[in-house]
Amino acid sequence: IHYVLSVLNELGEDTTPIGEETQLIDRIRSIMNSIASFPDETILSFKMAERKQFICCMNLYSELLYLYHLTAETKKLFEVTLTMVQLTMKNGLTVYSPASFANFGLAAVAVGNYELGYRLGSLALKLSQRINAAESASNIMAVVKWFIAWAFEPLQSISESLEIGYNLGNQTGDVYSAIMNKNFSFSAMFLSGKNLVFVRNQTAAFIKELRRRKQEWCVNALAITHSISSALIEGLGVPWSIENEDTISAQGKKRNNKALLLNYRCHQLMKALFFRLDDKIRSTACILDELTLTEAPLRPTFIVAVFFEGLACYRMERKSRDKKWMTRGGTALSFIKTIGQSSPWNFENKMFLLEAEKMYTIGAFQQSKELYEKAILSAKTHKFIHEEALSHELAGFMHLENQMPREAVEYFAEAVSCYTNWGALALANQLDSVANKARGALVTNSLQPNDHNSNFQFS
């Protein structure tokens, strides 16, 4: 990084940091307003630049983009992409311009303008094809589809696009971007409810291939996806076959890889909620706080983890009656509502389920019932089978804990079916044992029709 900056300085470029974060945000918004007035057709019709020094500078800035993605220094990444966009608008196109628009789309998303961010990302993909910027095509696909497209495109199709990005990287020799596309694709598969056996087996095979090629740098991120898939299939007692959890955490801290550490904690929280590990929830339900502290750009894993954090907080509020959990659950719900406005496909069911849990927690049982049904229908419609299962499960516990075992058993049966189809056999077995207890209690109650004081505490 220092070498690239020194060469840019020798070429007369001002690489002085912008300064305070508020100044950077103001700059981003100013350039956003300027670009918004340019139709896509105008930018696509820009001529290719010929001045060699300008092309050389854009090449060097593009190297910085790669490096700042690696180090997760988002503020510096945005400073560079701002400069590249301004230079492009002033001097014309280079093969590095599509990457600048893709990353500026990422900056637009970071300040809350999802629509412009998606427009710029889509523009970057079109521009890459128009000027035949094949060398950066894979990188652009990773940036646009993983960091931007979640606001408008189904997660299921994002996974497919990232597979295309992987193939593009292999074809052009961009090994780094190819591997990142593959890693993001596996994450999208997991988050969208792809069969867990497929995800586990494919991540294991890819990790084995990376190690054969001595490309270890992305193994930890892939091992996280492999680990949670294995746990949901076989249970928490299954030893790690790819990488040890403590090793991943230690390596993330050693490299100061904030994105990896946050990704790791996100999956730990998901696992804790699925297996109802309250002590683990207490130590991991802080994703929103960490998102504020880290510079890592927003991505589907982080957003879904906030959804899980909200569910975990409402659970802990009902158990502890500590109002801090209610407050944090409300913050998570507000976050998902804001995010979900742009993509009902990806987030509508999550919003409904958080609303249902909130209503249940405050004692509004009729409203919670209606919202659980909306969450179930939305998850089914949008093909999130794992979240359909979770919605059935939580609705079942609400009914069970409110002395309605017959309805609870019906919800549990649907949840077990969905978990089984997802491949989460450990969760299906865990819940089936709860359902069996509820069935037993139901039979006992039917033999004692005058006893209305039975308590069901199976969660």
Image (tube, helix red, strand yellow):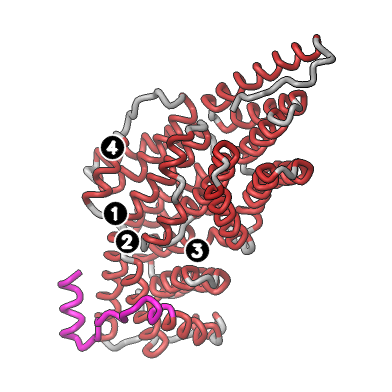
For the magenta stretch, what is the residue range? 1-25
Asked if the residue at tag 4 contacts the one at tag 1, i.e. Cβ–Cβ closer than 8 Å, the answer is no
**From the viewer's perspective, is residue 410 above or below residue 392?**
above
**Quick check: marks 2 and 1 in contact, CB under 8 Å?**
yes
Q: CA distance from mark 2 to mark 1?
A: 7 Å
Q: Earlier in the sequence, mark 2 or mark 3?
A: 2
What distance separates the C-alpha of mark 2 from that of mark 3? 16 Å
Look at mark 4 in the image and give the residue it sits on.
246
Single out the mark in the foreground, 3 or 4.
4
Q: Is residue 92 magenta?
A: no
Q: Is residue 281 visible?
A: yes
SS class, disc 3: loop
Counting residues from the start of the chain, the first of labels 1 and 3 encountered is 3
Residue 307 in view in this figure: no
**Which residue is drawn at the image coordinates 62% and 59% (left, top)?**
337
Q: How many marks?
A: 4
Kindly identify which residue carries mark 3: 148
Q: Is residue 257 left or right of residue 152?
A: left
Residue carrying label 2: 72
How far from the left and from the top, in percent, is residue 406?
A: 77, 24
Task: Report the front residue among 156 and 311.
Answer: 311
In what element is the residue under mark 4?
A: helix
Residue 18 is inside the magenta segment: yes
Q: CA distance from mark 1 to mark 4?
A: 15 Å
Q: Residue 311: image x %, image y %?
A: 57, 44
- Please state the horizontal and vertical placement of residue 5, each as a whole percent of the image: 20, 76
